[in-house]
Amino acid sequence: MGTWVKETDKAIYLMDGNTYIAAVPKRPSPTNPQEQVVDATALQSWFARRDKPRAMTVSVGTGASEPSPAPNPPKPGDTGLVIDHNGQLRVVKDTFFKVSPRQSSELAIAKKSW
C-alpha cells in the first residue's frame, strides 16, 4: 500500500495502512497562541525513506480520533513464523489435520473441491 502522511489536531503521523509508524507531536507556538509548531527535521527523514509517503490527509478540526500505533515488531528470540508485513500475521503454534485421501468416485458431489 505504501506510506502516507496524516495531520490531526495533536500530531503529524507517518502512516502505513491504518496505523502509524512514526509521529511528530504538535506543540503551542511560543509567539502566537493560535498556532502550533512541529519539528520539521523529523518529517524530513520520512521523505528520505525508500518507501517515502506519496499522499497526505488533513484531519484538523474534524473531531476524528487519533490513529493507533503499528504493532511492535517481534523481539529477537521470539518463536513462531513471522511474515514480513508490518508484523500483522504471526504464527506461534502449528495445527495439523489428519487427512485420509479417497478416490473422487467415493465422494459425494458436495464433498468434492473443484
Image (cartoon, grey):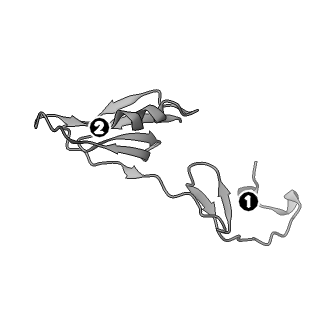
Cα separation between marks 1 and 2: 61 Å
Please identify, in this view, whether the residue under mark 1 or under mark 2 is nearer the observer: 2
Q: Which residue is mark 2?
A: 38
Task: Report the front residue among 40 and 15.
Answer: 40
Q: Secondary structure at mark 2?
A: loop
Who's the residue at 68% across and 66% down the image?
Answer: 80
Counting every numbered tag in the picture gives 2
Who's the residue at 35% across and 48% down the image?
Answer: 67
| Residue 71 x %, y % | 49, 56
Q: Quadrant of residue 12?
A: top left
Q: Quadrant of residue 50?
A: top right
Task: Report the front residue among 19 and 31.
Answer: 31
Q: Which residue is mark 1?
A: 111
| Residue 34 x %, y % | 11, 35
Mark closer to the chain start, 1 or 2: 2
Task: Report the front residue among 53 and 92.
Answer: 53
How many other residues sit within 10 Å of disc 2, few (<14), some (14-19) or many (≥20)? some
Amino acid type indicated by mark 2: Val
Amino acid type indicated by mark 1: Lys
Relative to 71, 111 lies left or right: right
Question: Which dot marks residue 85?
Answer: none
Question: Hey, which residue is sitting farthest left in the picture?
Answer: 33
Relative to 42, 30 lies left or right: left
Q: Is residue 1 above or below residue 72?
A: above
Question: Hey, which residue is sitting farthest front in the picture?
Answer: 30
Who's the residue at 87% across and 64% down the image?
Answer: 102
| Residue 72 x %, y % | 51, 58
Q: Is residue 73 above or below residue 80?
A: above
Q: Secondary structure at mark 1?
A: helix
How many other residues sit within 10 Å of disc 1, few (<14), some (14-19) or many (≥20)? few
Who's the residue at 71% across and 71% down the image?
Answer: 95
| Residue 61 x %, y % | 18, 37
